[in-house]
């Protein structure tokens, strides 16, 4: 997750304006895209939404093999909070895809 910190731009914060906890198989991360745009380890209980998924689903999201909506509809992604706010994170996952593609070159 640390390598994705540079992807949190002012534009992304402005477009999403949401705070989310990503609960993965072996860790939890808080993405605060409301004010400053930060990623930190651990679950912040004041987050707007919580996305709970296995590591494999997270990797599918960031490499483009699935979308937030598809993962949710198939039951691979569990959501606590507003689904519309969760959909706003799609652009962040696309940015992560781009970063991975650039790193592979």
Image: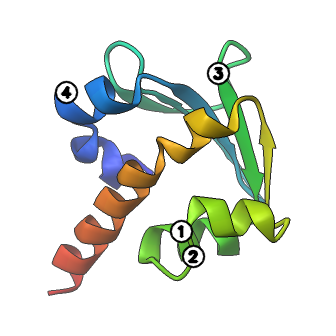
User: Residue 46 at what x, y percent from top left?
Assistant: 68, 12
Q: Earlier in the sequence, mark 2 or mark 1?
A: 1
Spatial CA span between label 1 and label 3: 20 Å
Q: Earlier in the sequence, mark 1 or mark 3?
A: 3
Spatial CA span between label 4 and label 3: 19 Å
Q: Are marks 2 and 1 in contact (CB under 8 Å)?
A: yes
Can residue 55 be spotted in the picture?
Answer: no
Q: Residue at x 33, y 51 (%)?
A: 4
Q: Residue at x 17, y 75 (%)?
A: 102
For the view shown, which residue lies furthest in the front direction?
Answer: 84
Element type at marker 4? helix
Spatial CA span between label 3 and label 2: 23 Å
Numbered label attached to residue 10: 4
Q: Is residue 42 left or right of residue 36?
A: right
Q: Nearer the viewer, mark 4 or mark 2?
A: 2
Residue at mark 1: 61
Q: Is residue 22 above or below residue 57?
A: above
User: Residue 88 at what x, y percent from top left?
Assistant: 47, 41
Disc 2 packing (10 Å; few <14; some 14–19; many ≥20) = some
Q: Earlier in the sequence, mark 4 or mark 3?
A: 4
Spatial CA span between label 1 and label 4: 22 Å
Q: Is residue 18 above or below residue 101?
A: above
Residue at mark 3: 48
Element type at marker 1? helix
Numbered label attached to residue 66: 2
User: Residue 23 at what x, y percent from top left?
Assistant: 73, 46
Numbered label attached to residue 39: none
Q: Earlier in the sequence, mark 1 or mark 4?
A: 4
């Amino acid at each position: 997750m640390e390598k994705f910190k540079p992807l949190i731009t002012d534009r992304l914060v402005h477009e999403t304006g949401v705070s989310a906890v990503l609960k993965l198989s072996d860790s939890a991360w808080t993405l605060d895209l409301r004010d400053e745009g930060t990623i930190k380890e651990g679950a912040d209980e004041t987050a707007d939404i919580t996305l709970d998924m296995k590591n494999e689903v997270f990797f599918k999201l960031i490499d483009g093999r699935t979308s937030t909506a598809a993962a949710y509809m198939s039951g691979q992604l569990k959501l606590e909070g507003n689904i519309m706010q969760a959909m706003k994170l799609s652009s962040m996952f696309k940015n992560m895809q781009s970063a991975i593609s650039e790193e592979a070159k």
